[in-house]
Structure formats: structure tokens, C-alpha cells
Image: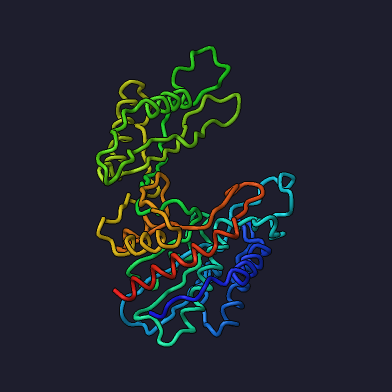
Amino acid sequence: MTPAAAAPVDSIVALARALIAVPSQGGIDAPDAVVDTLGHWLAEQGLEPAVLRGPGGDPVGLTLDIGANRGPCYCLNACLDTAPFGDLSAWSLPPTAAAARDGWLGGRGAADCKTAVAIFAHIGAEIASRVPGPAGTLTLLFDADEHTGRFGGVHAFAASGRRPDGVMIGYPGPDEIVVGARGFWRATVSVFGRGAHSGSRAAAVDNAVVKAATLVRMLADVEIPAAADDDFPIGPKVTVTGISGGQGYSVVPDRCSVAVDIRLTPRCDAGWADGLVRALGAALDEAVPSPRATVVEPETTWPAYRLPGSSPLAGALQAAAREARQKDVPLVVAGPSNIGNFLATLGVETTCGFGVTYRNLHGADEAVEIASIPAVYDAYRGALGRLFEG
């Protein structure tokens, strides 16, 4: 692969500013405008991106293939939508001002992940301009439906049958490369009681909310296995994330639902989580009998994943990041899940980060350090060179 040119920092910042200036809060702003902004820039570079659409036909992302469509395929991925603005009065400038001040580029999405989008778009344009091109295919994938939790762009891409040899996600942070993450299992657990008037002279002994409180305590007190080994150094975790029940002051609740999020590891998987919660429900019903047995309704799950030590994807990015930063960048397993968990179910290896230096992620005055852009550009360009050269 032809050696990379120096990072075009001014042009990257200009594109990032144009993207930040377009509101694209996930689930709040329609993604059309930000998709159009990026699509127009790519078209100006002589590229032909394709809009990804969800089941209803709305745009959920943008994708583009560069190369001869032969040999290995590697994908650069970052999101176009953002977290909500939050309290506007907490910002020193409007979230879409996209101001560059004192070496920092600010605005909602500057860190997550519009600067990465701008970097990856420039890498794509630079590779597309080279003759000969890559010994394979570079895919750019920009999700405009990530912060909703739907990951609509990635799902639309996967639904097309595309399976890259590896995906590198441009999440921010220059100090580590995520090569694995805990999965999750989520469920609604409903417990039951017997409805009655709260003013009745009879004792209200069959109150579903009270029973649910007992379940919450049982979940909080459950004994969690420790981390199993160095390859996956984080253990599972059980969290109650919501409780809902009751229909007014004068009624003894006859149903109450508890939302449960369990973080998974390779050894403590979805089957373990499901069995754990069902066993707790059975124990609760034995201790506090009710007209109906506790009902466990699993909603969604992603497995834990961890790239093998021999992963060429992780090795190439780590080596290129080390060269770009002139320091070691460790490979780590993360506590929160990411789209890499989903891609792992498709057999696609995924890294998350290396990325720009940032502050106030998802908070007021979110910003990235402009001086950190060249190392990120060089790292991903170098990783692609290693991967395509084999």
C-alpha cells in the first residue's frame, strides 16, 4: 500500500466543524441533514457513498466501499448522531457552535464521534486517490442511529449480508484499545399480589410493590462470581435499573415490574443470567406466596467478547498506535458493551478506540484536542497498511 500522506488537520477540523454544526441528537433530531452534509463532502472528493435506510425507509447511516472489491475487507466505523445537548445554560457556547478555541474543538459530538468521522472520511479519500489502490476493500460505515441504542446503521449494513474481516471503531481516547467487552442480558421481572382498597380495615399483606422490594434486595445481595482469568479480567454485574407498579393511592398494587440489567462474561453468559433470575423468582414465590408466580421476560442480550491474542486486527492497530504515539497502547477489556458485541455474533472482529483526546464526553462543553488528530489519523492509516499488506 502506498505510504500515507501527512494528516490534513485543517481539512479534518473543517469537516468536523461542519458536522458538529448540524444538530443530530439521537432520537431527537432527524438524521437526514447530517447524513446529507457528510454525503456531500464525500461526493466532492469524487466518492459515491450509499445511504443506509431502516425498516421504515428513513436514513440511518452512510457507507462507502473503496478498492477493488477483492482480497480482505476492513471497515472504519464511527457514529454521526450524538448524545442530547442537556442543559443549554451549562454550555459556554451553543452545542452546535463548533468553535475552535485554545487548541480545542468544541460542541456536541466533537468527541463522540464526529471528529472520528472526519478523520475516517479523510483516510478514505486519501486511499481512494492513490494508484495503485489497496490490496482489498476499505469500507467506511457511519451510523446515524447509534445513540438511540438501536445501532440502526450497523444493523442495516449487516442485514445486507456484508461481513468485513474486521471493524475498527473510532471511539475517543488515546490511551488504550478496547478488544473485548462484557455483554448484557436484560429482562423485566413481574411479581404479583392481590388488589384491594388501601383503606380497608384488613391488613394489606399481599402488596406487589412490597414483594418487588424484596426481590430488589435479593438481586442486590446476590453473590457474584469473581473475574475468571486474565484473558477476561472483569466479572459479571447485576443491576436493578427500574421499578414500576401501582395505580393510585387508594389501591393496593397487584402487579409490580422490576427492570434488571446483568453484565455478562464468557463464563457467566445469558443462560447463567436467566437461570439466576428465575431461581431468585422461585425463591421469592416460596417465601412470599402470591396468586400468580413471578414472570421473567427477557428482552435482549448480547454476549461478551474478547479478541484472541493472535488477532491481526488488534495487532495491526496496536503496532500503528504505538508508532504514532511513540508509546505503548495497551489492549483492554471494557465494562460497558459496544457494537463489537453484536458484530462478534456475526463472526466479525472489532476494536474500539484508539481515538482523539477529549474532555466532557456527553457533558456540557464537550471538546477534543486538535493536536491529537494527527496521531489518530496516522494510527488508522498505518493499521490499514499493515492489514492490506498482510
Q: Quadrant of the N terminus?
A: bottom left
Q: Is residue 135 left or right of residue 84?
A: left
* Residue 337 % position (x, y): 41, 49
Q: Nearer the viewer, residue 282 or 265?
A: 265
Q: Is residue 308 left or right of residue 51?
A: left
* Residue 249 % position (x, y): 60, 25
* Residue 339 % position (x, y): 42, 57
Q: Is residue 53 above or below residue 366?
A: below
Q: Quadrant of residue 89?
A: top right
Q: Nearer the viewer, residue 100 or 260?
A: 100
Residue 55 visible, this angle: no
Q: Quadrant of residue 294?
A: top left
Q: Nearer the viewer, residue 47 or 189?
A: 47
Q: Is residue 316 above or below residue 244?
A: below
Q: Is residue 170 left or right of residue 236?
A: right
At 38% across and 59% down in the image, what residue appears?
Answer: 351
Q: Is residue 338 above or below residue 220?
A: below
Q: As drawn, which residue projects farthest toward the bottom?
A: 131
Disc count in the image?
0
Q: Quadrant of the C terminus?
A: bottom left
Q: Looking at the image, what colour scheme do you see?
A: rainbow
At 50% across and 65% down in the image, what residue appears?
Answer: 143
Q: Is residue 237 above or below residue 300?
A: above
Q: Quadrant of residue 30?
A: bottom right
* Residue 92 % position (x, y): 74, 49
Q: Nearer the viewer, residue 247 or 120?
A: 120
